[in-house]
């Protein structure tokens, strides 16, 4: 069989636009003499369409777009992800479905059985579970069709225990080929797990398997693509390029050439961040980004990402020194901007800062300098960025990293201003690793930026470690508490940390909840981001009451 | 039987604190010679505990708190809402459960069968469904125990269709009394629906019914209490006070005295907003609120609410005029603050505004006045409020209403600054109704504030209707599109509106999604709030691409 798996980048809810892409891919597949054409989960709507699914006209339109695809399927066997009305049983009104089409006829639907409702997924809000597993006959072969999560329950290393394992039912149907359509989001170092899961499925079913995954960033989620083909021994035979539209073309009869597959996790992480920025802008019809450059490593990294995502000519950086800004920060920023060929504009804020101090001094009742004055500086910078954004149609990129967001070491309405928090989900540890990775061939980020002690430069001689433990400790607690949901005792044991420090850091994480709630959407690149798929009350009495 | 139903106000996650309240209530019930004591759903954790449920130590502690309650139950039959580990079947690791206790023994658990996963509810993220319905024997009577949603599927007017109706199973068990423990949040005009639903259940089961509901505000949700007792004919016999801790004491053998029940929906709405503010502050251990007073109706209403919630002496209002502020606004604000005996401080912003114009003029490239300059004024005000908040430990209340939030007629990081968006979920139409309701006995909000045309006063001679249709139209579209998920065509038909206008308003709603995402948490008082229980992509191509 000749199979064309099309890894497309849909835009959420852009039903006609996405269908247009699907139709184009069908024609390309036809030119390549493919017999089977495969598209990702929810290819017509893009994944996840969220509450657009609550509108009848949205569902109607999806049914109509599917008709166009059926119409275009002459002589081809097509599997495409869509969402359809549940007219068959009680319960939720929709199915997350794979439409199986052959030669201008709809052969049927395979509705997703396991509906992920954890982390960033809320499928049980919308969908009803499909019941039995199905194979479809094509040229004497039995083609099993499944959707994403349905194969995951077969592995030990899954996120969630389910009552059933659909692969066991599929096994009884003895498929000759398994097609899995997916919208499986990226996170750092996830790909190895994915290979393990799919490989086991192929072995169990003793048949080759195609996994066709969505690519592209939709709001906070980045889908990496990396669609895969496994032989019946569970060996990975081919993978598409990650983070771009691509396709797999497979001849199941042909011996596969030797395939070696190397992954650079930092390269993937960097690509994910670049795609996160690129698609956010492109899909919103914006092209220009604006950001403050502090001389620190976070804004330096964001500048590199923005330059790659949008082109240096579309990025404007602002240098906004106050009385606490160091000369070296200024020089480092200039050097970095020059290295990236990005325009750097100077708007000093110290005069404005003084104006606020004067204006507010009667109301401040003679109280001494505290974070209020620090926040004032950060907020003046935020206001300047937003004013230029409003006047000249830039989107502001905010540069706070995950460790700072965890600790509340950011100013609400100050450095948290922005349309997109590029590093919201990247710990300080990973920020350093990415910076060094960027400099792996030549120095783009000035060495001094990487070497110096982190400082917000909002008061004299300040460093982050005046008020925080070392970031290597902070990041362990984030790993344990935020990503793995370990309690304080477990973290203390696992990382051999001091209990008082761990407790204090966990308390800080909860105390900063109110800030993060109003932060910019971030690009999710870890197992558990603050900005999506994590729900905590601001008002709670469990931690730090 | 003598029943004491205790309508408590728990704090989310404050397990020992909540258990303490439960233990106190048990002692009170004992003094009143009650035989049965009932507490709301999730009384130990407070509802909803959200992702605190993902921590093992949190669940452990809940089991331990339950032991304390069992220990305190000598001679009493107690039903209390808790969350327990699922050690019985595959699937999610927890049950949302009612512990049924008698005389220091745990008789068993009734686990919730229907797990709401729509609107603000995400129970399938955490819980596994309990299977069968149960009755418990007490002094020769069969006591049916159910949790909240489990009785709702019995009505026609439900939010969601389920595959089963647990009341039909309960019917077979022929209970003598049904105890329903609930955490059913308030929304405007919901109570009538609740009475209808519970009344039908009593009729079907032909037995009396107690519904014991949580009270109190937890982040964005307000639980109104209004616990109820119905006789076996489905007649409402008694209701607790709403929006405060209270209890029902019922003698099932006694003829009920005549009971008439009148509801004032505006009074309830006002109470909900007051409780929303009060509990947010109290549970966060804050006492003082700060807000800008513009001379408009929204900030006037918020000031009244804040005064009632926190006491006038705990509220500070700021008057922050710019060159576009009218003298009448200033006078109206002064009169209002005087009526409420609230301190009003003047911090004029015009000088600061000019400083920004001067600072930014080179970067603005000679472009003319637009929303940028309007936003500057709003953001200077936001900064001043936040500076005082930081320095003097106020929480800032933001005053934008639901209609403005829908339209994006608010400034991100400007008037959207604040810890709580008091009117986020109150349309302009309801703002007027509430203002008139407040003035029903005497004029508290100056007539002029109610009468004048809405204006942000951010440019000369501005009114909201320069750029928006009349709010009565805006609010119809909010009702149709946001609350009832109607499409444009359906809204045009239902409200007899112009299609172009409806389309434009729906587009505005989606275009403002990015602002609302960074807005303060609001108090949810409608069927569908922007701030909780509504999920839309910022980047989407269905509307207004």
Image (spheres, coloured by chain):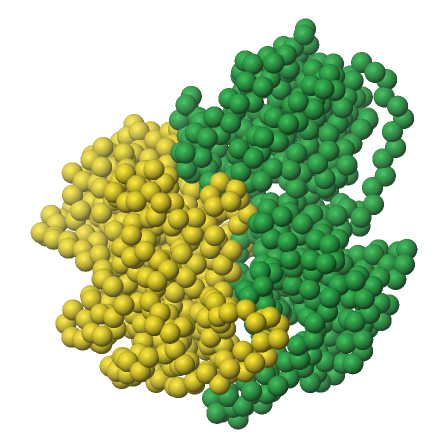
Chain colours: A green, B yellow
The answer to whether B542 appears left or right of B303 in the picture is right
The answer to whether A323 appears left or right of B278 in the picture is right
Coordinates of residue A210 in the picture (x, y in percent):
71, 25
Residue in the image at 72% along x and 41% along y? A243
The answer to whether A4 appears left or right of A103 in the picture is right
In the image, residue A399 sits, relative to residue B380, either above or below, namely above
Locate residue A186: give its quadrant.
top right
Task: Answer whether residue A180 is visible to the viewer in this image.
Answer: no
Q: Nearer the viewer, residue B145 or A338?
A: A338
Coordinates of residue B494 in the picture (x, y in percent):
26, 40
In the image, residue B359 sits, relative to residue B282, either above or below, namely below
Residue in the image at 62% along x and 48% along y? A282
Coordinates of residue A528 in the picture (x, y in percent):
64, 50
Coordinates of residue B275 in the picture (x, y in percent):
33, 65
Q: Nearer the viewer, residue B368 or A479?
A: B368
The answer to whether A295 appears left or right of B217 in the picture is right
Q: Nearer the viewer, residue A24 or B293?
A: A24
Locate residue A454: give its quadrant.
bottom right
Residue that sits furthest to the left in the current view: B258
Task: Answer whether residue A281 is visible to the viewer in this image.
Answer: yes
Q: Nearer the viewer, residue A454 or B268?
A: A454
In the image, residue A364 sits, relative to residue A512, either above or below, namely below
Residue in the image at 73% along x and 16% along y? A33
User: Count the marks: how many?
Assistant: 0
Residue in the image at 39% along x and 48% along y? B504
Residue that sits furthest to the top in the current view: A140
């Amino acid at each position: 069989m000749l199979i064309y798996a099309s890894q497309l980048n849909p835009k959420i809810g852009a039903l006609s636009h996405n269908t247009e892409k699907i139709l184009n891919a069908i024609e390309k597949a036809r030119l390549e003499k493919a017999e089977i054409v495969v598209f990702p989960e929810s290819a017509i709507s893009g994944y996840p369409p969220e509450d657009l699914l609550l509108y009848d006209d949205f569902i109607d339109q999806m049914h109509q777009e599917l008709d166009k695809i059926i119409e275009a399927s002459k002589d081809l066997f097509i599997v495409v992800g869509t969402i359809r009305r549940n007219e068959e049983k009680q319960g939720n009104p929709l199915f997350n479905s794979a439409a199986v089409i052959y030669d201008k006829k709809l052969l049927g639907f395979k509705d997703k059985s396991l509906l992920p409702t954890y982390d960033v997924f809320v499928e049980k809000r919308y969908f009803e579970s499909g019941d039995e597993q199905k194979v479809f006959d094509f040229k004497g072969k039995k083609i099993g069709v499944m959707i994403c999560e349905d194969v995951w329950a077969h592995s030990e290393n899954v996120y969630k225990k389910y009552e059933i394992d659909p692969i066991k039912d599929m096994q009884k149907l003895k498929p000759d080929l398994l097609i899995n359509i997916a919208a499986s989001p990226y996170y750092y170092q996830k790909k190895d797990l994915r290979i393990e899961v799919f490989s086991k499925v192929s072995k169990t079913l003793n048949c080759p398997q195609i996994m066709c995954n969505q690519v592209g960033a939709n709001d906070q989620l980045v889908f990496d693509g990396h669609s895969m083909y496994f032989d019946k021994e569970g060996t990975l035979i081919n993978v598409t390029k990650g983070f771009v539209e691509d396709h797999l073309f497979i001849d199941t009869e042909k011996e596969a050439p030797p395939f070696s597959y190397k992954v650079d996790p930092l390269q993937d992480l960097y690509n994910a961040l670049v795609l996160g920025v690129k698609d956010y802008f492109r899909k919103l019809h914006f092209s220009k980004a604006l950001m403050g450059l502090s001389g620190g490593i976070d804004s330096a990294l964001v500048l590199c990402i923005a330059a790659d995502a949008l082109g240096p000519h579309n990025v404007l950086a602002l240098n906004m020194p106050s009385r606490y800004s160091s000369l070296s920060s200024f020089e480092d920023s200039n050097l970095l901007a020059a290295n990236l060929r990005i325009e750097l504009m100077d708007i000093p804020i110290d005069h404005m800062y003084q104006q606020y101090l004067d204006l507010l001094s009667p109301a401040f009742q003679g109280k001494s300098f505290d974070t209020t004055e620090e926040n004032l500086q950060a907020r003046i910078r935020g206001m300047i960025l937003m004013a230029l954004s409003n006047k000249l149609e830039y989107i502001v990129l905010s540069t706070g990293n995950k460790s700072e967001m965890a600790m509340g070491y950011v100013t609400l309405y100050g450095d948290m201003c922005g349309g997109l928090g590029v590093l919201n989900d990247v710990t300080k540890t990973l920020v350093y690793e990415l910076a060094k990775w960027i400099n792996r061939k030549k120095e783009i980020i000035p060495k001094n930026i990487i070497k110096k002690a982190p400082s917000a430069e909002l008061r004299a001689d300040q460093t982050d470690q005046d008020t925080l433990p070392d970031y290597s400790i902070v990041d362990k607690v984030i790993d344990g508490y935020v990503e793995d949901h370990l309690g304080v005792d477990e973290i203390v044991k696992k990382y051999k940390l001091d209990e008082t420090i761990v407790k204090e850091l966990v308390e800080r994480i909860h105390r900063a909840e109110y800030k993060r709630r109003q932060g910019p959407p971030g690009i999710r690149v870890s197992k558990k981001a603050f900005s999506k798929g994590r729900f905590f009350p601001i008002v709670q009495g469990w931690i730090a009451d």
